[in-house]
Image (cartoon, rainbow, N blue to C red):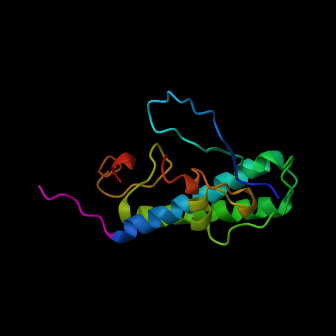
Amino acid sequence: MTTKKLPPEYYQMLEEIQANDFVALELNLYLDTHPNDFEAIKQFNDVSLKSMEMKVEFEKHFGPLMNFGRSFSNYPWNWKDAPWPWQV
Amino acid sequence: MFTQFKYWKPYISPFDPCEPIRIKSYSTPPQLYIQFQPPGLPQYPTAKQALHCGTLWPDLFSPYPNPEKKGN
């Protein structure tokens, strides 16, 4: 059984998604206390949109990131395949 | 200007069996000194840098653990 070898792009794209989501999280927490900060809201929307695009792009190559309808699936059904988040 | 770390010298007993820690420090991050974060603070240029530093705004960055402490 050959052990599955992942291309380096897998880790690069995943790290970019992680960094992007971190910015979204920071802005989210900031906006909780600054609801009228229009600049931050614009930035938050840009970051969220970028995050969705990056995830769709990632999923085209490496399979779904999320399940229960939050990600498209490839054929055959492979959200259960390795690596799981803790195995990455 | 605020400092990221504060230091103090604990009492060292003459009967202390182990090598005592002469100077101890504790972290005082910037958010202790900012009542309410003003809007429009400068941000890190890249998301990766923000992720690495643990915050989106350089003004709120605090280097934990203490770099001078070399591990202990």
In the picture as drawn, the residue positioned furthest to the left comes out as A1
Foreground of the two, B27 or B20: B20
> Which residue appears at 85% of the width and 57% of the height?
A37
> Which residue appears at 79% of the width and 55% of the height?
B2
Foreground of the two, A60 or B72: B72
The span picked out in magenta is A1-7
Q: Position of residue A75 (x, y in %)?
A: 31, 57
Q: Is residue A7 above or below residue B18?
A: below
Predominant SS along the magenta part:
loop
Q: Quadrant of the N terminus of chain B?
A: bottom right
Foreground of the two, B49 or A11: B49
> Which residue appears at 71% of the width and 49% of the height?
B29
How many numbered badges does the structure rendering display? 0
Foreground of the two, A28 or B7: B7
Q: Is residue A43 above or below residue B7?
A: below
- Residue A5 occupies quadrant: bottom left
Q: Is residue A21 above or below residue B33?
A: below
Magenta residue check for A4:
yes
Q: In screen coordinates, is A30 left or right of A15?
A: right
Q: Position of residue B44 (x, y in %)?
A: 68, 68
In the picture as drawn, the residue positioned furthest to the front comes out as B14
Q: Position of residue A18 (x, y in %)?
A: 52, 58
In the picture as drawn, the residue positioned furthest to the top comes out as B15
- Residue B49 occupies quadrant: bottom right
Q: Position of residue A16 (x, y in %)?
A: 51, 65
Magenta residue check for A3:
yes
